[in-house]
Image (cartoon, coloured by chain):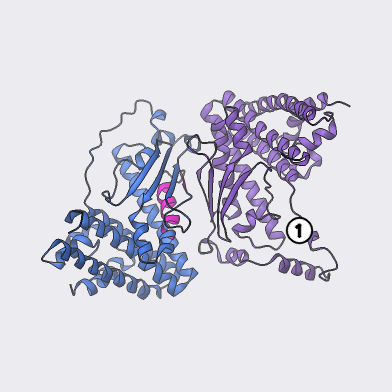
Chain colours: A blue, B purple
């Protein structure tokens, strides 16, 4: 047993498995289709980013929270904190969020698997798509350094939403000072489980990567994505076995459920709502069950 | 120590920075802080877009690759730095450019004259709009640090323009071709034999003086345009007030500059040290910037005052 609790280890495994599913799919698409595969990967990543941005915006609007940088980066996170993550926050206000990420578990595992450049594509496409779209496509994400870039040793985030660039009709939705009488609602900080968070995100990520691959590359992409998903699941199964052994857990099946975002368990059913197009669910569950069915 | 030629360039650069500072101050005073900021950001974006579109046309019409590298390549780019700019290019590739600036005369002038915030509008909007226009909306410009921000002691730019995000046509056009090949092609097409005419004739680099005159004309023009579009006569009036302030400041600055170099402040001196010619309509730098009575306003608020102060 290492320095982390079993629950923490599961959360980190979930994160690594989610991160690697992206990398395996990206690697296979580029390997099979070259620049066209990269085009699909980038497009799928952007769609995924926009979905997450839009989801956060809707949730904030439903809660009566202003759509701005302070709230984006402080209210209603969709994942629990990863104990390996290190960040220094330099500025957080409604117009800007400036921070340096010093240790990113996603970048670390991409590097460990020799897939830093695939990770770089994620950083380059996901963050602007997500943050800019959250703020009605009026924000500007500046990410000039990332840990996935060969010359960088930290991520340099400077994400801005300038009130002067927001049209008058949207200003009251974004900034308290433009909404006279606004009373900020009390927000209950509900902890989110790693399993729930990563299952939600993995379904979305897979869905958009599949969608973009089928649209841009055609049906030939399907077996390529399938191969990648099986590779990711096999890698996840090996990770689960290491965790099972380290923590003396009796059932590998249970550890796989605890550490892999999508296993086909009935409890995961709800996360597919809205993401069943392109037979995404059937494809994904078929592929992962080929691997986990043997566990 | 800089030579006389470099000092003239610095004088022109500082005059541009001062023009922007005066316009920003008047616009924010007259129209209000937030409306003024909106006008300035919009005007700068328009100028940045214009610059990016012109660069794309320049690169295209000369048969060069329309990749990211050529947007910034020495001898190709139409934006030439003041000799005081100090920085380092970290990565210079066809689809990726990362660079840092440690010393910027614009930021220095704005920071030392209480205009850091207004200056930051320029930093945040101009290059971003320029890159987006040049890449037809498919590129990225990340500016994580700026010298106009009190937290930072350098500017950090990272631009990306990936083949996988381009249309197939643009990807083909962006692939690296050698300039020699493109020149050969242009000579072949014109029926001339390579070697009978200097290749340089096919493509002329932009000088610092041309670059700063264009930047001055376009930033002024597009701020005027945005001010008028958003606030009508009140916007134009705010710009005019800014120009008058700049006129006073320019007369003073030119006088000092002439004195320090033991020259008379005459028409020749002004032409070599100021980024607006005595007749804007005769300068190619003002192409596309002559609407909205922009030259007339510049003449009455600035150029006539300078002319009155010149020694004959």
What quarter of the picture does the N terminus of chain B occupy? top right
Name the residue at 30% across, 31% down.
Answer: A184
Q: Chain of mark 1?
A: B
Magenta segment boundaries in residue numbering:
A121-142
Q: Position of residue B231 (x, y in %)?
A: 59, 30
Name the residue at 63% across, 60% down.
Answer: B66
Name the residue at 74% across, 53% down.
Answer: B205
Q: Position of residue B265 (x, y in %)?
A: 82, 28
Against A110, residue B245 (above or below) is above
Against B250, residue B85 (above or below) is below
User: Does the image show residue B278?
Assistant: no
Against A238, residue A105 (above or below) is above
Q: Secondary structure at mark 1?
A: loop
Instruction: Report the side of A151 relative to B68 (left or right).
Output: left
| Residue at mark 1 | B203
A122 within the magenta span? yes
Residue A25 placement: quadrant = bottom left
Q: Position of residue A230 (x, y in %)?
A: 29, 72
User: Does the image show residue A197?
Assistant: yes
Instruction: Report the side of B86 relative to A226 (left or right).
Output: right
Residue lying furthest right: B312
Name the residue at 60% across, 34% down.
Answer: B108
């Amino acid at each position: 047993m290492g320095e982390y609790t079993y629950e923490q280890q599961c959360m980190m495994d979930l994160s690594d498995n989610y991160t690697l599913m992206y990398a395996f799919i990206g690697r296979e698409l580029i390997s099979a289709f070259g620049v066209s595969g990269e085009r699909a990967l980038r497009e799928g990543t952007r769609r995924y980013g926009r979905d997450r941005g839009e989801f956060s915006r809707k949730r904030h609007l439903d809660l009566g929270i202003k759509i701005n940088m302070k709230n984006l980066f402080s209210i209603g996170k969709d994942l629990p904190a990863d104990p390996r993550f290190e960040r220094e926050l330099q500025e957080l206000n409604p117009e800007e969020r400036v921070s340096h990420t010093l240790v990113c578990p996603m970048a670390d595992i991409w590097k460990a698997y020799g897939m830093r450049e695939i990770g770089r594509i994620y950083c380059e496409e996901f963050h602007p798509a997500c943050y800019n779209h959250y703020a009605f496509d009026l924000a500007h994400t500046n990410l000039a350094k990332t840990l996935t870039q060969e010359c960088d040793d930290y991520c340099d985030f400077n994400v801005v939403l300038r009130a002067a660039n927001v049209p008058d009709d949207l200003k009251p939705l974004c900034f308290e000072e433009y909404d006279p009488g606004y009373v900020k609602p009390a927000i209950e900080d509900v902890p989110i489980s790693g399993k729930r968070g990563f299952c939600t995100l993995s379904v979305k990520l897979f869905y958009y990567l599949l969608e973009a691959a089928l649209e841009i590359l055609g049906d030939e992409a399907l077996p390529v994505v399938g191969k990648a998903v099986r590779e990711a699941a096999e890698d996840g199964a090996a990770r689960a076995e290491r965790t099972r052994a380290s923590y003396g857990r009796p059932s590998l099946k249970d550890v796989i459920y605890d550490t892999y975002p999508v296993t086909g368990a009935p409890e995961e059913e709800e996360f597919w709502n809205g993401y069943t197009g392109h037979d995404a669910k059937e494809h994904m569950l078929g592929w992962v069950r080929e691997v986990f069915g043997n566990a | 120590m800089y030579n006389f030629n470099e000092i003239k360039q610095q004088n022109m650069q500082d005059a541009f920075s001062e023009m922007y500072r005066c316009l920003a101050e008047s616009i924010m005073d007259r129209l209000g802080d937030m409306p003024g900021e909106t006008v300035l950001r919009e005007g700068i974006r328009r100028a940045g877009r214009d610059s990016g579109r012109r660069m794309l046309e320049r690169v295209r019409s000369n048969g060069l690759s329309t990749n990211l590298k050529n947007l910034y390549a020495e001898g190709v780019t139409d934006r030439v730095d003041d000799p005081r700019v100090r920085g380092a290019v970290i990565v210079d590739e066809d689809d990726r450019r990362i660079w840092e600036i440690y010393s910027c005369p614009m930021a220095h002038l704005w920071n030392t004259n209480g205009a850091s915030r207004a200056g930051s509008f320029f930093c945040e909007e101009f290059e971003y709009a320029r890159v987006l226009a040049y890449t037809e909306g498919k590129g990225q410009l990340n500016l994580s640090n700026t010298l106009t921000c009190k937290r930072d002691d350098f500017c950090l730019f990272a631009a990306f323009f990936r083949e996988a995000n381009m249309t197939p046509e643009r990807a083909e056009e962006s692939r690296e071709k050698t300039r020699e090949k493109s020149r050969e092609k242009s000579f072949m097409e014109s029926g001339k034999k390579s070697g009978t005419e200097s290749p340089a004739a096919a493509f002329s680099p932009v000088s610092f003086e041309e670059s700063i005159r264009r930047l001055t004309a376009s930033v002024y023009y597009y701020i005027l345009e945005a001010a008028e579009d958003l606030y009508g006569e009140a916007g134009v009036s705010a710009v005019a007030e800014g120009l008058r302030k700049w006129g006073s400041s320019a007369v003073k600055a030119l006088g000092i500059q002439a004195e320090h170099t033991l020259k008379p402040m005459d028409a020749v001196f002004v032409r070599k040290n100021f980024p607006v010619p005595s007749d804007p309509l005769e300068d190619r730098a003002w192409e596309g910037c002559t609407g909205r009575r922009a030259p007339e306003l510049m003449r009455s608020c600035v150029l006539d005052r300078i002319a009155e102060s010149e020694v004959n």
